[in-house]
Amino acid sequence: MDELTEKKRLEALREELHHHNHQYYVVDTPEISDFEFDQKMRELISLEAKYPEWFDPNSPSVRVGGGLSQGFVSMAHRYRMYSLDNSYELADLTDWEERNLKLAGQDSFSYVCELKYDGASINLIYEDGKLIHAITRGDGAEGDEVTANIRTIKSIPLKLKGNHPKYMEIRGEIIIPHHEFDRMNQERIARGEEMYMNPRNTASGSLKLLDTKQVAERPLECLVYGMAAAESDLLDQESFLIAAQTWGFKVPDTFAFCNNLSQVMDYVAHWGEKRQELPYETDGVVIKVSRKSQQEMLGYTAKSPRWAIAYKFPSQQVSTVLEGVVYQVGRTGAITPVGQLTPVLLAGTMVKRASLHNADQIELLDLRIGDRVFVEKGGEIIPKVIGVDLASRMPEAQPISFAHNCPDCGTALVRVAGDAKHYCPNTWACGVQIMGRIEHFISRKAMDVQGLGAETVALLYHAGLVRTPADLYQLRPEQVLPLERMADKSVAQLMLGLEESKKQPFHKVLFALGIRYVGETVARKLASAFGSISALSSATHEALVSVDEIGDRIAESVISFFQDPRQMEWVQRLSDYGLCMEELQLEQAELTELLSGKTIVISGVFTQFSRDEAKELIRINGGKAGSSISKKTSFVLAGTDMGPSKKTLADSLGVPLIDEHEFLRMIQKV
Ligand code: AMP
Ligand code: ZN
């Protein structure tokens, strides 16, 4: 290619990647596979490396990060970033409206209600549709310039679409969705690191990281709620929110236009109930007078706009008395101290227990039995103790001396340097650990054994029938039937569940083994890097740490697991019983005619391959992937979440449904 062609190609790639990024991260309807996206990104990066003179700070390639900041400079906001007045009672809203009506000499207002996203506020400055600066709120007059970090956040458009003011400041909140936050914490626990306390602090902390690559890896999102601009022809808040969506911003669809205050009250009541179902943290509702002209009549106080107010939901934090501490043993032997509380109502549920994390945390908070403590409900199910009311401490409050022995088996606890947790070392005879490992093994994200739950595991354990997960596959119906609450049907379901679980792919089996620090993500990485249990179990430390994101701690844990003959014994048995001990190898596939003449429609999602890989499998085995079900369809390759209408259509046309396992059998992959 000559230089001109390459320049055109580079520009086309930038456009395409901006578009696909928006499809994926903002509107959630990807048009190409991750693989194709990565290919294009790689091509772009190599062209940019070849032609540094064509550098563009807003190229999609900045999303991947790279480059260290020296620190942050502070920068003034051209338009002040205000706070919001808070209200805690519905009556405050009525007062607020009355005051405003009088002040502006109006008869009525219409409002827009939005959720109050709980993260870090950001000011995004665009000129001619290009992001030029991003500044934190700071003190409202000036904040830190964090543009390089902000450019890595994929839901923030670097180039805008459509018609927009020439200069404008977009106001949004940087947040981390609950499920991503939980995943980050799971991974931290698996690596033996301290958990993050809450999504808000982690989000704002992330903006101040010096390494943009690290920021790019954080699951940050930006939710947009406002704009400041000198010239804008948008007449009200809801036109703005809609326009912002067309420019490429992520504006949650939860906002609502309200004709009057009573509709506002309905909105508040609705989200007060439903807020737990939201994918991200919210601490209230923001109510805004919608019309620009009326907003201008009302103006601002020194601190906040008069035309907007935040209604805060009742607190998710309460104080109560710490009555005692009990200790729980996890499947890895890790001990978690749990505070026993005087029962207290928190966000609609009665709370009696709260996690105290570990000995260090107890010391850090300086907790004593009898203290009045603050308890907060975060994204997790178990609330946590976040602080002590030192002012009300009783002189007789007793310092907590951490347990010396396992509450289950009595073995002396051990603590390894560099790990905040205490452990019960009695791995092979500590009942709670044994049951915990089996429960982990059968859990949904691991082997997903249907028909088996914690209660049955306990029954099986106490009857002496299982000591390791491998024992499950040796169970005979006549052994299980005599157990409490077991009947023919439940036994049959259990047997079927176990049989079905043998179809779980290798990375899930690996996760199910419960190797310390090997969480879901790490299991996937190890499975694809080593391909099989035999390769993994003989991998050297060096080979392990050469895998992306695998450090010394994980490597050591993997090695010591497989070096233990008692572990190897049950893992070997799992392999003998037919569990999947190898990763499906798509790359090495050879062309076959196994599906020749067949037209196959793919529907739903699969555990062992992506939809794109399914298409690829069909192609290399001589079949054709069809896009819609018709009489000509040979069968539907049906995953989970297949649409009910598709299923009805397939049934009515007599087109069979084939599940992924059967499909793999057809193409002789299992
Ligand atoms: P406060 O920090 O309590 O003064 O509240 C003001 C902050 O709420 C703003 O700086 C925004 O970062 C944040 N906020 C979150 N959601 C919204 C929203 N929908 N509209 C306006 N501000 C919001
Ligand atoms: Zn024990």
Image (tube, rainbow, N blue to C red):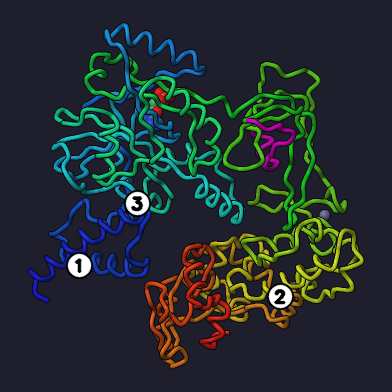
Mark 1 and mark 2 lie on one chain; the one further toward the N terminus is 1
**Mark 2 sits on what residue?**
499
Q: Position of residue 145 (x, y in %)?
A: 28, 37
Mark 3 secondary-structure assignment: loop
Q: Write down the region rendered in magenta.
A: 348-364
Rounded to the nearest angstrom, the CA distance separating label 3 from label 2 is 40 Å
Is 51 in front, or is 320? 320
- Residue drawn at x 52%, y 51% is 184
Any magenta on residue 403?
no
Mark 1 secondary-structure assignment: helix
- Residue drawn at x 15%, y 64% is 51
Q: Using the rendered view, name the quadrant where residue 499 is placed.
A: bottom right
Mark 3 and mark 2 lie on one chain; the one further toward the N terminus is 3
Task: Decide if residue 231 is on the left or right side of residue 446.
Answer: left
Q: What amino acid is found at the position of numbered circle 3 in the picture?
A: Val
Mark 1 and mark 3 lie on one chain; the one further toward the N terminus is 3
Is 156 in front, or is 660? 660
Q: Closer to us: mark 1 or mark 3?
A: 3
Q: Is residue 218 above or below residue 308?
A: below
